[in-house]
Image (tube, grey):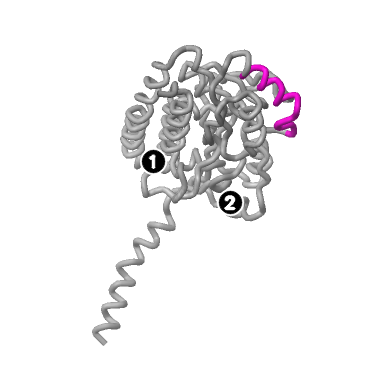
Amino acid sequence: MQRRALLLSALVAAAPLAALAEDRLKVVTTFTVIADMARNVAGEGVKIVSVTKPGAEIHGYEPTPQDIVAASDADLILWNGLGLERWFEQFLGNLGDVPSVTLTDGIQPISILGGAYEGKPNPHAWMSLDNALVYVDNIAKSLSKADPDNAALYAANADRYKAQLLAEIGPLKDRIASLPADRRWLVTCEGAFSYLARDLGLQELYLWPINADQQGTPRQVKAVIDGVRANEIPVVFCESTVSSDPAEQVARETGAAFGGVLYVDSLSAVDGPVPTYLDLLRVTTETIAQGLAPAE
């Protein structure tokens, strides 16, 4: 009897907590990078869900009926904009009247050079530390609007998170700035690193401007081979969500080193190399710094 009474008492005590969990603000994001930023700003009191999963390629993603169901009860949707989520407008149309916020509002875009999307904005704005601070502020504002009672908490979390980003990435920028000018080149598969290259003072060369139908064609590979040879570029890289074969071919034919994998469009699983946005920016910048450093 006593055991049963204790059990009933525990269930009654847990009921308000369960109700509280059900009443939590639910925020749906289009991809994992934004989801992690939002978690850092929101704290544990908000449920954050990413439509795309770790390791996914975002540009051509095709939402499933399950994705729509998972997002149907969202209180707020956060998305990148700048043409990144080409599938998003139709997806949002299936959800009805859910408020959505474009996190690149206030960011000056870099234009895509070449290819089918020439002249359109390069969507990978989160790869700039300065831009990341804008994303964080936009997330804090959108959460505060959806949940005004916790606005002070979101503002404090945003300030703490921005300070953490600056402390981690600032020294890496200084490290790359100290490299000889003729080594400060960033060669990648997709031109997804234009904002990062600008921040780091790197000249940029890539196989294709943005993930689309034509990736790693013979013409693209030849153009980069010629550029690597002409500028005596020591290393080439490729991002994690596409095949590195074209970049490795460039390395073989020019004698440049293949510097490894960079991360841009997606976080990894929790036990992977970049489970958070801070990890993604840090690991990518460290990989570039190590690859460009002169041999001792």
Whether label 2 touches label 1, CB < 8 Å? no
Tell how many labels: 2
Q: Residue at x 56, y 37 (%)?
A: 265
Which of the pair 41/16 is nearer the observer? 41
Point out the frontmost of discs 2 and 1: 1
Q: Secondary structure at mark 1?
A: helix
Residue with the mark numbered 1: 40
Q: Which stretch did the figure color magenta?
A: 213-228
Q: Looking at the picture, how far across and down is residue 18, in whole percent? A: 39, 62
Q: Which mark is residue 72?
A: 2
Residue 144 has which mark?
none
Where on the picture, by quarter, is residue 84? top right
Task: Judge from the rendering whether residue 53 lies leftward or rightward of residue 245; answer left or right.
Answer: left
Q: How far from the left and from the top, in percent, is residue 232?
A: 57, 16
Q: Amino acid at mark 1?
A: Asn
Along the line of sight, which residue is nearer the eye, 57 or 150?
A: 57
Q: Residue at x 62, y 36 (%)?
A: 244
Q: Residue at x 54, y 47 (%)?
A: 54
Q: Which type of secondary structure does the marked residue at label 2 adopt?
A: loop
Q: CA distance from mark 2 to mark 1?
A: 23 Å
Query: What's under tag 2, amino acid-wise?
Result: Ser
Question: Quick one: 117 or 95, which is closer to the camera?
Answer: 117
Query: Image quadrant of residue 234?
Result: top right
The crowd level at tag 2 (other Cα within 10 Å; few <14, some 14-19, many 20+) is some
Please tell me how crowded label 1 is: few (under 14), some (14-19), or many (20+) other residues with Cα within 10 Å. many
**First in sequence: mark 2 vs mark 1:** 1
Magenta span contains residue 222: yes
What is the x, y in percent for residue 294? Answer: 44, 21
Q: Is residue 277 above or below residue 186?
A: below
Task: Give percent across and percent down for residue 245.
Answer: 65, 36
Q: Is residue 166 left or right of residue 114?
A: left
